[in-house]
Amino acid sequence: MKRIAVLFSGEGGNLQNLIETVHGNTCHIVCALTDNPNANGIIKAKHAGIDVRVLEYRHFKTREAFDQHLVAILQSYCIDLCVMAGFMRIVTPVFTSQLKAINIHPSLLPRFKGAHAIERSFYSADPQAGATVHHVTEELDGGAVILQQAFWRDTDESFQSFHKKIRAIEYEILPKAIIGLLNDLK
Ligand code: GRF
């Protein structure tokens, strides 16, 4: 069975969704790695019996040194794919030249790259919103799009309901993208 690592920084909602959708059938999540020792996702991964690794940026002098350590940990798990799901760090060529990685982003890229994408797309006049799975490159949220799903916005929609729709799309397209990519590796 194919092996993946999931990288996260906070709640771990996408991680939990991957545990429920692909873990143990399409692939094994062999490692859940976070840069945040207080991330709620840690509990979710441990509960599912997944190896958790915490790698804090403050222990490193440069982004490259952090990335080299990150790559070494991930390579020690012999992964086929690295999945970033709410991992709040920008990686350098040290990472991208050595590992194949994808990321989930809560907007219709190239719209709203970077932080607070849900808020920025909610307060925009864009008639559509959605989420995107893309390849990870050193350009923030700039790699080639793998999957994207959109919805037409209701003019009187609350932020809460808008947010819920984005998350529902994330939970649909990230497993789909992983399954597709791992199938292509066979
Ligand atoms: C998601 O909306 C993801 O697209 C973004 O950060 C959020 C992470 O949420 N990059 P969670 O930790 O998966 O709950």
Image (cartoon, rainbow, N blue to C red):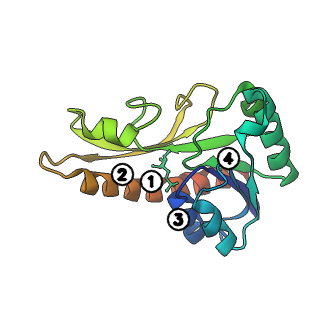
**Residue at mark 3: C-beta within 8 A of ligand 1:** yes
Depth check, front residue: 78 or 40: 40
Which comes before the other along the chain, label 2 or label 3?
A: 3
Disc 2 is placed on an element classified as helix
Disc 1 is placed on an element classified as helix
Disc 4 is placed on an element classified as loop
- Between disc 4 and disc 2, the foreground one is 4
Mark 4 crowdedness (10 Å alpha carbons): few <14, some 14-19, many ≥20: many
Tag 4: residue type? Asp
Which comes before the other along the chain, label 4 or label 1?
A: 4
The disc placed on residue 170 is 1
Tag 3: residue type? Asn
Expressed as whole percent of the image width and height from the top left, the position of residue 80 reads 76, 51
Residue furthest left as drawn: 156
The disc placed on residue 34 is none
C-alpha gap between disc 3 and disc 4: 20 Å
